[in-house]
């Protein structure tokens, strides 16, 4: 077995401890339009995504004849049978080549999920930079093996399986390829928050300490990625669309550009927000706290030599003087100078 990697490496760059890699999953949300796919690529790039991903199928070989010809008549269908519906959304080699060039031009990684062996070969000829194995193929060791043999980074989604299924897939892939990220996933679309079980990220971190862990997120919101990051996830996948009301099954649980921008923005903020372990007064706190904090002041005019009693003192804003917790240190001391009403009582003015 190949030695396991301690970090996920993409294009010869390893993810550092606090870094994350975010994939905008377009799938077939391009609706079969090359121009719409380019628009999605560009919007994902503008939102801060590191990669965009499509799905690739050889529909006529992937499905049984009866399944291919099964009637598919609903508001989201692009043809009268399921197979023809899929064909209407499928890009071929010319579209993939054009999208690969476009992605390179705008500097965003572009790859796809192959759902069958023909699609693995299709994508390998295009020299994709990495590969995704869908949850539906968590138990498909044959497909996993062929992808792993390509020696490119692999992202494995783990919806619909148990820990033994994940371990089997992991062991199978690592026989041929050590560059693996394992993504927790619930394979329902959209996922009910009660089925997300984000704590599985921690389970994976414990079970696979030398493998990068992530989240394939089918939630309708933007909170899950931030929570998963705090649990240890560093690779993220989220479905992406231009319009959640568009025709197609995936749009409704996808993020639009503004939502994608926000979830990536939130992830970027986490290391800075976590900051230091040391609790101390910060420079940024000094000015606002000066107005709100309290100081020990004279409650009335006091003369030099007066012995201070508690009734001679008051606690008022702003700060800058002795803090209230020092009041016991002031009581009983003699003044070295006279003080006026509301004047700060300072240590240097006490005998």
Image: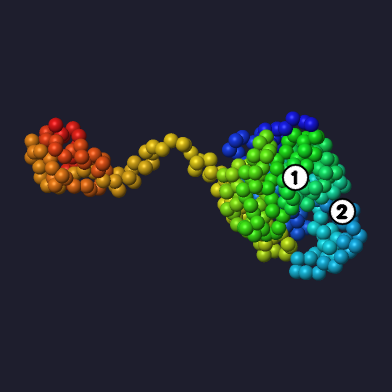
Name the residue located 20 percent from the left edge and 34 percent from the top edge.
347
Residues under numbered marks 1 and 2 in contact, where contact means CB atoms less than 8 Å apart: no
Position above or below: 304 against 133: above
- The quadrant in which residue 282 appears is top left
Q: Is residue 28 left or right of residue 287?
A: right
Q: Is residue 350 left or right of residue 173?
A: left
> Mark 1 or mark 2, which is nearer to you?
1
Q: Is residue 301 left or right of residue 318?
A: left
State which quarter of the image contains the N terminus. top right
Position above or below: 135 against 6: below
Q: How many discs appear?
A: 2
Residue that carries the numbered disc 1 in the rendered image = 164
Q: Is residue 35 left or right of residue 293?
A: right
- 127 and 20: which one is in front? 20
**Label 1: few (<14), some (14–19) or many (≥20) C-alpha neighbours in 10 Å:** few
Give x and y (percent) for residue 319: 27, 43
Q: Secondary structure at mark 1?
A: helix
Position above or below: 266 against 335: below
Q: Is residue 295 visible?
A: yes
Q: In the image as oriented, which residue stretches furthest toward the right?
A: 65
Residue that carries the numbered disc 2 in the rendered image = 62
- 48 and 323: which one is in front? 323
Name the residue located 74 percent from the left edge and 62 percent from the top edge.
248
């Amino acid at each position: 077995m190949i030695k396991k990697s301690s970090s996920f490496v993409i294009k010869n760059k390893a993810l550092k401890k606090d870094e994350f890699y975010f994939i905008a999953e377009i799938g077939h949300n391009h609706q079969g339009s090359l121009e719409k796919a380019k628009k999605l690529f560009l919007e994902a790039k503008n939102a801060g995504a590191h990669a965009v991903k499509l799905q690739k199928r050889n529909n006529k070989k992937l499905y049984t004849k009866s399944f291919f010809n099964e009637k598919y008549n609903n508001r989201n269908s692009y043809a009268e049978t399921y197979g023809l519906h899929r064909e209407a959304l499928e890009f071929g080699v010319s579209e993939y080549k054009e999208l690969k060039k476009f992605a390179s031009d705008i500097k965003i990684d572009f790859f796809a999920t192959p759902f069958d062996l023909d699609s693995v070969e299709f994508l390998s000829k295009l020299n994709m930079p990495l590969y995704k194995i869908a949850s539906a193929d968590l138990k498909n060791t044959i497909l996993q093996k062929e992808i792993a043999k390509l020696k490119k980074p692999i992202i494995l989604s783990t919806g619909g399986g148990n820990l033994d299924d994940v371990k089997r897939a992991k062991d199978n892939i690592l026989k041929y390829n050590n560059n693996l990220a394992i993504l927790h996933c619930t394979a329902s679309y959209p996922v009910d928050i009660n089925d997300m079980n984000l704590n599985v990220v921690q389970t994976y971190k414990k079970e696979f300490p030398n493998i990068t862990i992530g989240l394939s997120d089918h939630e309708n919101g933007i909170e899950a990625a931030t929570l998963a990051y705090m649990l240890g996830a560093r690779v993220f996948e989220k479905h992406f669309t231009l319009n959640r009301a568009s025709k197609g099954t995936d749009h409704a649980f996808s993020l639009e550009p503004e939502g994608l921008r926000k979830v990536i923005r939130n992830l970027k903020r986490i290391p800075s927000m976590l900051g230091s372990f040391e609790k101390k007064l910060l420079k940024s706190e000094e000015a606002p706290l000066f107005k709100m904090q309290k100081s020990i002041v004279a409650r009335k005019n006091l003369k030099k030599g007066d012995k201070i009693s508690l009734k001679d003192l008051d606690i008022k804003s702003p700060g800058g003087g002795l803090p209230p917790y020092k009041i016991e240190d002031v009581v009983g001391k003699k003044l070295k100078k006279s003080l006026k009403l509301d004047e700060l009582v300072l240590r240097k003015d006490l005998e």
